[in-house]
Each structure stands twice: as C-alpha cells, then as structure tokens.
C-alpha cells in the first residue's frame, strides 16, 4: 500500500484522523457482531468483598454460582459491564478463578445492596477517545515543539529543520542517541539489541539528569522494558492499570509505589474515616426533619473535603515518585492521562514502534522535547480492521522512507541466532546488511542446553523444514470460522515431544488462530503433566524470542492458495524468533507455488535439514 501525497502536515493528520474514525466504527461493529454470537452475560454473581487498593484504585470480588471456565471474554485487563437493576459500572477484570471474579476500577463506588449482579463484555473506546484528544491538541498549534517534531519527522518544512553536524553519522550508536537534538529513527532488525541499546542510552542520559519517558504499544513490551531497566539498577515507575501488567513488574507500578510510601498510612486513615462518614450520611431515613437534613448535608460536605485531601496527598506522592524516577514506562494511553500538563520529559523513547498507531507518536511529541522511535519497519504493523487503512503504514516506516538518512540509525549486528536462521530474512528483507556475530554462530549445538532432550536430539541443524507433502492432509475450516487448522501438522508437532522433553524455552507458532487453539487443546490432553511450551500466533509473539521455535504454516490445498501467508512481514516475524533452532512445518507443494516460499524451501535444502513427515509419522 502506498500513501497518497499530502500537501502539508495538517492534511496528513486529518487523513489519519479519518482512518482512526473508520477503525473505531469497524471495531465496534465486529464487537457487537461477536457479542450476539457467544458473549453471554454471567448472571447470579454475589458481591463478596470490596477493597481499597491505593490512590483511586478499588477492587471488588464477586462469587459465581457456576463455573466460569471457558467464558471467552474473561481475561486479565478486559473491560466488562457490571449491572444490577438501575446500577451499572464499566470496570476491568483483574483476575478470575473457577467460581470468583475480581474486578478493578477507579474511584469510590456506592454498590447497591443487591441479591445478585450480572456481568457482560464491554466495548471500550477509551483509546480512540484519547487519540482524538491528542489530535485535537496537535491541530491547535499551541505546542510548537511537538508540531515541529512531527512535521520534520514526516518530511514537512525541511527548510526549518535543524541540520545535523557532519560528523553525526560517524558517531557510535550510543552517541548518536545522546547527541540527538530533535528526533531519531532506530531501524533494528531482529536480534540487533534494540532494547540493550535503549537501556544503555538511558543510563548515560540519567548521568546528565535528563528526564526520560519510554513508551511501547503493548503491555508486554512495556513490561520487558521495566524488567531490562531494573536489572541495570534504574529506578523505574510503570504507569497503567495493574490488571494489565505482568505479575513480575507489579512492584514497579505507580499504585504499588504509592501504597509503599510513608504518606499511604495517612491516606488509609482518611479513607477509612471517609467511608464511615458516608455510611452515616446514608443511614438517614427518607423522611427526616430540618435538623437531620442539615446534619446530613454537613456530613456529605465533610466527606467531600476529606476526599479532596486524599486526592491532593495522593497526587503529591504520585508527582514525587514520577519526578524522582530514572525512567517512567507506559503504554500510550495511561501516559497521556497521567502526565499531560504535569511533567515534561527531555526524551521519549518509543519501543516496538511498528506496532503503534500513528497518533501514539503525536502523543509522545506532546510529552517530551526529543523523540527516539525504535523498531523494525519490515515486521508487522498494528492489527487493523480496514484492509486498506492508511494506518497500516506506520509512523516509523513513513519517517524512515522520507528521511534523508541523517536521522536514521540502522543496527547491523545481530546477536540472537545462528546465521543460518537469519540468512533468508537477511537476504529478502534487509538487503544482506545484517552481520551475525561469530560468538552466536559458534554457540549452536545439536544437543543445545539439554543433552538428553528428545526434541534436540532429533535434529542436527539450526534450521529444519519438515515437509508434509505426500499425505492426504488438508486444511480444515470449522463452521463459519475464517481461520483454519491442519490436523496432520498438529499430529506431527505432537510426535516431536515426549514426557521427557524440556519445554521451558520452546514456542509453537502459527499464522492461524484456529491452529493455535487446536494445538493448545490437544497438548493439554496429550501431555497433562508436561509443562506447556508457549503456544501463540505469530502476531502475538512479535517482539519475543525462544530457544526453539516450531512454526506451523497450516495451508495445504491443491490450488496453491496460501491466504494471508502472502503478508511477508508475518513470515519475517515467524522466521526470526528462534535463538537456537527453527523448525518449519509445511507442505512444500502448496507453499512452493509462491515464489518467496519456494526460495525459502530451496534455501533450507541448501544450508539446513530437509526432512519428510514420513520420518516421524505413519
């Protein structure tokens, strides 16, 4: 897809705004359609417990009279609607078990004394609302610095853009970042140490007392930044709803840090007193006299003043923690709500930039003086509902394409995988510019870390293709589901494991959601006592890695139809997640109808291990 030419920055921003509005409409329609099919309400929930956490955060626990296992929309961080009679509250799932759900929300809520509650999925447009707010701010033209950063990065007003010193491109990677005066694009192919570079740059910038914000489009990427920075001794504060943040990084969240502060004891005392006042004020009967009415009014006034004191003290603690942090980490939306108009950063780093919607970069420019966008434009953009959306060409991709080369840093040395694994992607997507460090090449062993591991002992090369051609297998569609699965490939993958297999650093990937669902289900019944490997779609595994990757292509048909396997960026992601061994499972006849897949098959035959399914099954 190629963008239409725009005459100026505002014209392009309006086009992005229109594309965003289209996404919102399509996403809402898809949600409502899915809701009609199988997103049923959970009825008969009983309120068990109400807990104040910290700041404005509260949680409630509800008990269910029947099992909640298998309810599709019950997942950590998912928005849900809690109802009882005229009462309703939009909240988030914090955790759930077979017979209980804990929900998290902001602010004091007066729950009715109801016999039961009902829970249903909720479609949240908060991200779209935030981005509308951001775009409106940028179009106001009040923040000239933000306007300039976005304008220059997208190739507008080149005569106004400051020039870089002649020696700038000759500097080391770290120094390029440290001497950036406005913006920089870091083009990092797989395994080139993007996160390591970011953390090292942040360490140096903190020595200069610079205030730093790091953003990422996903909670996984944000949590990974927190883990990496904390290991280097940086004082990190993580923004966002704790319901969406990993257990490993909960101790870095702003709510947890506030809770551990000296001021929290006073907040808790005030909160307890507040609840007592509210309870007393609400205990009055409907028919009461003038004196009682006045006392009730004064009680509510006292409660209001007390809540104001609580909010002021919590805000003071919050500001102090953010001000003292070496690094503040967040996804886009929480950063906007928490930080706008309060704290200005010297630098904002945006990691995994190709997964972020363009307004996220507008948001970043409004929060900091200098912008560093990091990612790989040869990998997948964010998932979008409109096939022809302008948002599929990301801010990073546009910026690198329109750059004159002075503000693009290409990372050429990769440290993740043996050269055999990266070779196809290097030749196909990166013009052969990636250099594999020798220590990685020498690090491969047929037996890897586990000499008695049955999976490792089956192969002698870092890259393997197991060909399913010649069987009577076929791709299968269930009902009106557009996703497909391949039972023969699933059987083959299962045959690679036994009860002794070490699965601690193995990931099974596929482009197709249905294939992943089937593998997960069959794994649980086939190996109930063996820890499950990671089993995910390629899209959801972007940005991650594992020692061994097993990639199932699924497509097997006489027509040579491969569907969205034609999106070669998805192929690139799948091929570059392995640190030690990549096992590809697919039908060479079906896939070989495509010239690029044919090239991949031929390369594996040349440098790797080419095996037949008949060596493992039948």
Image (cartoon, rainbow, N blue to C red):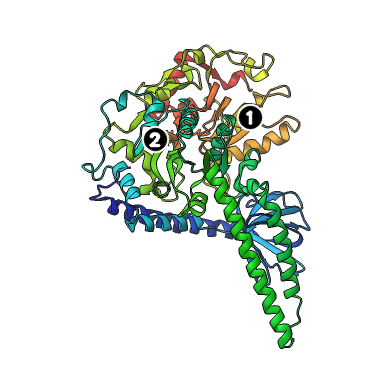
Circle on res. 377: 2
Please determine whether, in this image, residue 36 is positioned above or below residue 547. Answer: below
- Quadrant of the rendered structure where residue 59 is? bottom right
Q: Position of residue 28 (x, y in %)?
A: 49, 58
Q: Which residue is mark 1?
A: 491
Foreground label between 1 and 2: 2
- In what element is the residue under mark 2? loop
Give the mark, 1 or 2, whose residue is nearer the N terminus. 2
Q: Are marks 1 and 2 in contact (CB under 8 Å)?
A: no
- In what element is the residue under mark 1? helix
Q: Is residue 300 left or right of residue 175?
A: right
Q: Position of residue 225 (x, y in %)?
A: 54, 36
Choose between 134 and 123: the one closer to the eye.
134
Quadrant (top left/top right/bottom left/bottom right) for the C terminus:
top right
Quadrant (top left/top right/bottom left/bottom right) for the N terminus:
top left
Tell me if residue 384 can be seen: yes
Residue drawn at (46%, 58%), measured in percent from left and top? 129
Q: Say few, some or many: other residues with alpha carbon within 10 Å of mark 2 (under 14 / 14 to 19 / 20 or more).
A: many
Circle on res. 243: none
Q: Is residue 519 left or right of residue 556?
A: right
Tell me if residue 71 can be seen: no
Choose between 355 and 508: the one closer to the eye.
355
Q: CA distance from mark 1 to mark 2?
A: 35 Å
Residue drawn at (71%, 36%), measured in percent from left and top? 524
């Amino acid at each position: 897809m190629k963008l239409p030419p725009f005459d100026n920055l505002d014209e392009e921003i309006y086009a992005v705004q229109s594309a965003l509005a289209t996404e919102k409409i399509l996403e809402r329609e898809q949600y409502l359609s899915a809701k009609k099919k199988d997103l049923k309400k959970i009825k008969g929930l009983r309120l068990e417990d109400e807990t104040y956490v910290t700041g404005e955060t509260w949680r409630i626990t509800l008990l269910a009279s029947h099992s909640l296992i298998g309810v599709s929309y019950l997942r950590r961080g998912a928005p849900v609607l809690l109802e009882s009679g005229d009462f309703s509250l939009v909240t988030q799932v914090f955790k759930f078990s077979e017979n209980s759900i804990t929900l998290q929300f902001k602010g004091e809520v007066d729950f009715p004394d109801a016999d039961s509650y009902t829970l249903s999925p909720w479609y949240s447009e908060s991200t779209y609302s935030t981005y509308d707010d951001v775009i409106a701010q940028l179009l106001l033209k009040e923040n000239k610095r933000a306007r300039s950063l976005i304008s220059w990065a997208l190739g507008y007003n080149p005569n106004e853009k400051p020039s870089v010193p002649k020696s700038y491109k000759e500097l080391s990677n770290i120094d390029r970042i440290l001497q950036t005066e406005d913006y920089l694009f870091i083009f990092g192919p797989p395994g080139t140490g993007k996160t390591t570079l970011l953390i090292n740059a942040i360490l140096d910038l903190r020595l200069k007392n610079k205030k730093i914000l790091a953003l990422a489009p996903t909670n996984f990427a944000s949590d990974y930044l927190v883990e990496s920075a904390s290991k280097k001794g940086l004082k990190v504060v993580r923004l966002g709803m704790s319901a969406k943040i990993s257990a490993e990084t909960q101790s870095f969240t702003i709510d947890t840090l506030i809770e551990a502060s000296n001021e929290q004891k006073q907040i808790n005392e005030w909160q307890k007193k507040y609840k007592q006042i509210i309870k007393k004020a609400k205990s009055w009967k409907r028919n009461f006299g003038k004196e009682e009415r006045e006392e009730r009014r004064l009680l509510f006034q006292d409660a209001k003043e007390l809540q104001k004191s609580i909010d002021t003290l919590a805000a003071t603690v919050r500001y102090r923690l953010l001000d003292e942090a070496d690094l503040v980490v967040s996804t886009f939306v929480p950063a906007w709500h928490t930080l706008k108009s309060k704290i200005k950063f010297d630098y904002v780093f945006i990691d995994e930039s190709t997964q972020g919607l363009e307004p996220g970069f507008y948001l970043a420019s409004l929060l900091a003086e200098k912008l560093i966008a990091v990612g790989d434009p040869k990998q997948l953009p964010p998932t979008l509902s409109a096939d022809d959306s302008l948002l599929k060409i990301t801010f990073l991709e546009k910026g690198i394409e329109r750059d004159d080369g002075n503000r693009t840093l290409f990372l050429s040395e990769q440290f993740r995988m043996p050269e055999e694994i990266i070779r196809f992607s290097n030749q196909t997507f990166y013009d052969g510019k990636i250099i594999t460090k020798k220590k990685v090449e020498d690090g491969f062993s047929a037996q890897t870390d586990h000499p008695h591991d049955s999976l490792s002992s089956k192969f002698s090369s870092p890259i393997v293709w197991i060909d399913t051609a010649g069987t009577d297998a076929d791709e299968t569609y269930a009902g009106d589901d557009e996703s497909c699965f391949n039972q023969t490939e699933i059987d083959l993958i299962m045959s690679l494991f036994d009860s002794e297999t070490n699965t601690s650093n193995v990931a099974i990937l596929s482009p197709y959601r249905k294939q992943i669902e089937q593998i997960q289900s069959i794994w649980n019944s086939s190996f109930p006592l063996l820890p499950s490997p990671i089993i995910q779609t390629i899209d959801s595994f972007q940005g991650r890695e594992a020692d061994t990757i097993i990639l199932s292509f699924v497509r097997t048909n006489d027509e040579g139809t491969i569907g969205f396997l034609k999106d070669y960026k998805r192929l690139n992601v799948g091929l570059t997640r392995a640190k030690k061994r990549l096992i590809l499972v697919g039908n060479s006849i079906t896939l070989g109808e495509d010239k690029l897949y044919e090239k991949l098959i031929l390369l594996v035959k040349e440098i790797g291990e080419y095996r037949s399914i008949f060596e493992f099954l039948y």
